[in-house]
């Protein structure tokens, strides 16, 4: 910030003796300045080196009042003093500030945006799994490497979302306890996501409502406004939440329990999910992944409350491909054998998720609906009710084709929207997603990761963390 001047600038040339004397005097004064600064704290205030005052409030050139404005009076003494103060200021700032960077400190609950924790703008790469044998040629192919370089920006945005997910779920896993209201837990989680991703309308924010389906409810349940449900010590809770930047969605889930007797069930489901991730890859048939998941899942049995149960896959629940602003992009990843023979392709994002249950292994829609989403391919549909038109405009502006829930409508100030929302559903514009349930008295667990099929370097498990 301060340009260093030559010792002879602005002054006529002097004989050699005079130059030597001048330099000696300058050196002596510079040493005195350093000694004085060391005794008084040295560093300048936040204004930085070159500001009008130093740490003691005294002018930088107080011994020669007004010389700063006079032309031709800048010498080695003044510039040396500024240079030394600038160095002191940097040293003090680096040593005294809280470390912000990879591995920096996050608050509890999380409030510091990940862009602050990673000021370089580069976010951690997920776990990289090698291509299957038939695709190893890709690792050395220059064309495939170039494709990855072109897509780096999109990959980095997905990694930012994944980092937000890791930090938020780490807090939730530690913080949530029996006796808390489900609605309070969901709102704490979602507000943390909003802060860490620096919510910006449709550009960045929560990707879909937080699922906290419990016990026999497998998916698509979140509390509506006014719900007073409280977490019980024997609940099996599936926390399924997402983060998005520019429509690039990260979808990841885990199961939380407070009773060790459920651990074998969680282990079975997690192992099945890991099997699905290892089986995934470019040119892999989706049905082959389902067959391997089923084999692992149903090799387990669990004992709950003194009774032994075989672990079954929820056969009508699937993983899915993900596109920008489209959580279910068209391809389904089955968790049982016998699915379609469609293949995975390079560049695709997938949510690999499995559901294991002690019940019948088949879910049905049951209970009050909380999840909704505008149909991605819907065209113009004429609406007769003005309130329905107004609500549709609100949905378009705030959610687009991202999923939402009634709490989200409440949050943005919508009231008395029940009839209008039903009308949008009846006209096929908005799709309701009621809770998906196995038989009552059963327990369902879920684990899920988002993966990316990279053209060259392999399969990246974007949401991999130390927890699972």
Image: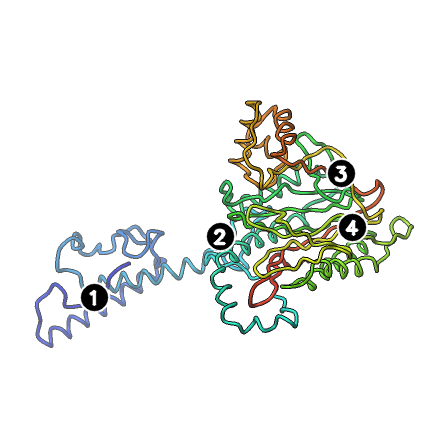
Q: Which residue is labeled 4 in the image? A: 315
Secondary structure at badge 4 equals loop
| Quadrant of res 132 | bottom right
- Residue 115, which numbered label? 2
Mark 1 Cα-neighbour bin, 10 Å: few <14, some 14–19, many ≥20? many
- Residue 365, which numbered label? 3
Q: Would you say the residues marked 1 and 4 are in contact, meaning their CB atoms lie under 8 Å apart?
A: no
Say whether disc 1 or disc 4 marks the residue closer to the N-terminus: 1
Q: Which residue is labeled 1 in the image? A: 76
Secondary structure at badge 2 equals helix
Residue 52 image offset from top left, x and y in percent: 26, 51
Say whether disc 2 or disc 3 marks the residue closer to the N-terminus: 2
Residue projecting furthest to the bottom: 16
- Which residue corresponds to the image point at 76% horizontal and 51% vertical from the top-left? 355
- Gap in Å between the C-alphas at discs 4 and 3? 14 Å
Residue 308 image offset from top left, x and y in percent: 90, 53
Query: 20 and 68: which one is in front?
Result: 68
Query: 217 and 432: which one is in front?
Result: 432
- Which residue corresponds to the image point at 69% horizontal and 64% vertical from the top-left? 278
- Residue 244, which numbered label? none
- Gap in Å between the C-alphas at discs 1 and 4? 80 Å
Mark 3 Cα-neighbour bin, 10 Å: few <14, some 14–19, many ≥20? some
- Gap in Å between the C-alphas at discs 2 and 3? 40 Å
- Gap in Å between the C-alphas at discs 2 and 4? 40 Å
Say whether disc 2 or disc 4 marks the residue closer to the N-terminus: 2
């Amino acid at each position: 910030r301060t340009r260093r001047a030559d010792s002879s600038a602005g002054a006529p040339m002097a004989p050699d003796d005079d130059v030597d004397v001048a330099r000696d005097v300058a050196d002596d004064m510079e040493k005195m300045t350093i000694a004085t600064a060391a005794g008084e704290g040295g560093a300048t205030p936040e204004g930085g080196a070159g500001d009008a005052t130093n740490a003691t409030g005294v002018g930088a050139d107080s011994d020669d009042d007004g010389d700063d404005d006079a032309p031709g009076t800048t010498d080695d003494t003044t510039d040396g003093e500024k240079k030394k103060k600038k160095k002191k200021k940097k040293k003090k700032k680096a040593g005294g500030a809280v470390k912000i960077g990879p591995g920096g400190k996050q608050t509890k609950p999380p409030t510091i945006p990940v862009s602050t924790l990673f000021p370089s703008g580069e976010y951690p790469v997920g776990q990289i799994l090698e291509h299957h044998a038939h695709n190893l040629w890709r690792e050395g192919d220059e064309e495939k490497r170039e494709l990855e370089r072109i897509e780096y920006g999109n990959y980095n945005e997905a990694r930012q979302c994944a980092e937000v997910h890791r930090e938020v779920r780490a807090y939730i896993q530690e913080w949530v306890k029996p006796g808390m209201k489900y609605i309070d837990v969901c709102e704490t989680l979602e507000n943390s996501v909003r802060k860490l991703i620096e919510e910006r309308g449709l550009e960045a924010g929560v990707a879909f409502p937080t699922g906290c389906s419990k016990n026999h409810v497998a998916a698509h349940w979140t509390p509506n406004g006014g719900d007073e449900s409280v977490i019980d010590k024997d609940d099996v809770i599936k926390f399924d939440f997402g983060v998005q930047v520019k429509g690039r969605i990260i979808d990841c889930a885990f199961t939380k329990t407070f009773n060790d007797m459920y651990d074998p069930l969680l282990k079975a489901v997690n192992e099945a999910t890991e099997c699905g991730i290892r089986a995934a890859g470019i040119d892999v048939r989706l049905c082959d992944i389902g067959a391997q998941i089923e084999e692992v899942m149903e090799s387990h049995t669990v004992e709950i409350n003194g009774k032994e149960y075989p672990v079954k896959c929820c056969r009508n629940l699937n993983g899915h491909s993900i596109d920008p602003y489209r959580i279910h992009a068209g391809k389904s990843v089955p968790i049982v054998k016998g699915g379609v023979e469609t293949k995975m392709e390079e560049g695709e994002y997938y949510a690999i998720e499995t559901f294991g249950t002690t019940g019948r292994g088949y879910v049905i829609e049951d209970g009050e609906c909380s999840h909704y989403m505008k149909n991605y391919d819907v065209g113009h549909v004429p609406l007769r009710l003005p309130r329905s038109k107004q609500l549709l405009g609100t949905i378009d502006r705030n959610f687009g084709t991202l999923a939402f829930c009634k709490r989200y409508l409440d949050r943005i100030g919508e009231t008395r929207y029940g009839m209008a929302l039903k009308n949008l559903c009846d006209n096929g514009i908005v799709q309701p997603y009621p809770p998906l349930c196995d038989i009552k008295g059963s327990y369902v667990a879920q684990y899920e990761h988002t993966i990316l099929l990279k053209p060259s370097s392999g399969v990246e498990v974007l949401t991999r963390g130390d927890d699972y």
